[in-house]
Image: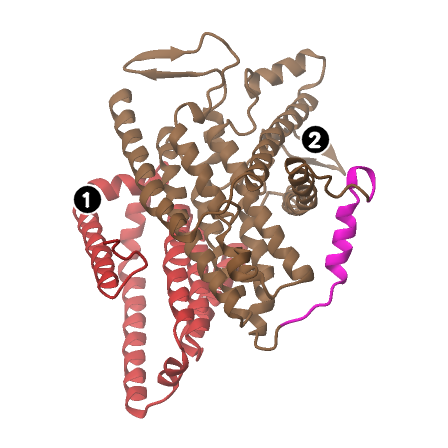
Chain colours: A red, B brown
Amino acid sequence: MTADAFLFWFLALITIGGASLVILMKNPIYSALALVFTMCGIAALFVTLDAFFVAGVQIIVYAGAVMVLFVMVLMLFDLKHEVEAFSKGRITGAIKLATAGLLAGLVMGAIFYSSTAVDTVITKQLAAASGDPSKQLGMRLFTQHIFAFEALGILLLVVAVGAVALARSKGGTHHDQR
Amino acid sequence: MGQDILEITINSVKLILIFLMMVQAVPILVWLERRGSAFIQNRFGPNRVGPLGLVQLLADAVKFLTKEDFAPDKAVRSLFYAAPVFALIPATLAYAAIPMSTPISIAAFEAFGSTWGPYLFRVQGYEIGVGIVFILGVSSLAAYTILMAGWGSGSKFSLLGALRASAQVISYELALGLSIVGVIMMYGTFNLSEMIQAQQGPFQFSAFGYTIASTVDWIPNWGIFYQPIGFILFFAAAFAESNRLPFDLAEGEAELVAGFHTEYGGFKMLMFFIGEYGHMMIAAGLATTFFFGGYGIPGITAQELQQVIVGWGYADQTANILNAVLHFLMYNVKFAIFLWIFIHVRWTLPRFRYDQLMDLGWKTMLPWALANTILTAIVIYVVAA
């Protein structure tokens, strides 16, 4: 086994192990921490693909910002009900199993489909790509995909404004001084 | 890591050396902090043990190592013990990516019946193409160690301190990240070594097709002259990121006992301590790299210095190593100045109130950082056209 292959299997094991811990842990806090672990594993996998910028952004955005908020919110909750909801209920259990099966089927289908269909496309793009990859990413993002990029930006802005509006109506930290 | 056994060995040793450098700098900084605070407050500070009180560090280390190792009854033991260990990782990983001197190139040589080299050793743990993205990403993981410690301690003070600290860290990360976007745009790279390369030589830039240069040699081409607002924002945010005064709300003694490390003592406490100093060192190293030319010596570029040393009668090989040593010293001088500013500020400014801290971060520093980014973009677009 070459070093690259070993690295891939090692990181894949860590990532999948972390991901399964997310759903196997009873306490949501451990699930969230395991998800952080998974994110870091995915970032490392990006590094093995030479996608350094994507790896860095993966860590900054998901592991560094989004998940910290998740963990903070979880820590403030009274978790007893959530722990019970995670582990009890026959009908919800059946629904959970069905959803998990559906998702697993989708993932497997996607893997089988991509292993046959994607090969040709990858080689074509690799041949075209040259120079600083992060610069290329920026070029492509701000020319070819500018509409999707701006639309996503507006969506996030709407979400942020909505969150602030909701939080304020239930009393925030900064009360009106009147 | 390298092509052959020698290169791999040296690169591995380098990683350990940089970690040891970081850890060994902590006692010296603690000594400096205690003596410095005493100097500022008209006291003596630790001056009994050894010359200038320097051996006090050793006594402290022995004390930390021999203290009783305990965990609170209600603690989540796995998280409680994991947190201090994880506190060291982000700081170490990030610091190892900062270049500290010019690369040392070793020509091919014969030994043990085979040819070795040529090699190029960088005076840093590892060179990463997107250096700054990596450093920001890794050091943003420090919030988890705080949360793990706060939650794992099973104490209300710890949890509140952890929530405060992590909210502060992620709030200021935004300002920190945006304040250096201007620098990244100006140099057009994420790579720290390339940024330092761009800051070598005397002050000079081209605008509207003209080249504007300083008439004297010793004014360096440093980032601070192009990004003064960026530097102020970066440095202020760095204080908040490393939980230092005036932003050390995480351990507001009057309100929270000691924040997230209330329940920690002995060596576990020391590891948090090293982590905090590590973040200080990253901030100092990055400020040096972005705004003060990194390892560059003002008034002379690395190539010119190489020529000068060769002129003294050394061989190319030796001159190259001497060159790296001189640049390494220069880096450490700048680095030490920033660390001293960190310490001086701690004993000069009082602590912010928490809502003031959040207002400063979100309502003052973030808009200024955004304005700086937009202004830099416009200037680059207009001037370079």
What residue sits right under mark 1 in the picture? A146
Mark 2, Cα crowd under 10 Å, few <14 / some 14-19 / many 20+, is few
The quadrant of the rendering that contains the N terminus of chain A is bottom right
Residue B79 in picture, x, y percent from top left: 55, 69
Q: Is residue B171 visible to us here?
A: yes
Q: CA–CA distance between discs 2 and 1?
A: 53 Å
* Amino acid at circle 2: Phe
Residue A128 in picture, x, y percent from top left: 29, 41
Q: Nearer the viewer, residue A167 or B329?
A: A167
Marks 2, 1: nearer the viewer = 1
Q: Name, please, the residue furthest toward the top.
A: B215
Splitting the image into 4 quarters, where does residue A26 fall?
bottom left
* Amino acid at circle 1: Ile
What residue sits right under mark 2 in the picture? B109
Residue range corresponding to the magenta coloring:
B49-71
Q: Is residue A159 magenta?
A: no
Q: Is disc 2 in the same subunit as disc 1? A: no
Q: Is residue A102 left or right of residue B188?
A: left
Q: Secondary structure at mark 1?
A: helix
Splitting the image into 4 quarters, where does residue A66 fall?
bottom left
The quadrant of the rendering that contains the C terminus of chain A is bottom left
Residue drawn at 74 percent across, 59 percent down? B65
The overriding secondary structure of the stretch rendered in magenta is helix
Residue drawn at 56 percent across, 69 percent down? B153
Residue at mark 2: chain: B
The vertical placement of A160 against A12, above or below, is: above
Q: Secondary structure at mark 2?
A: strand
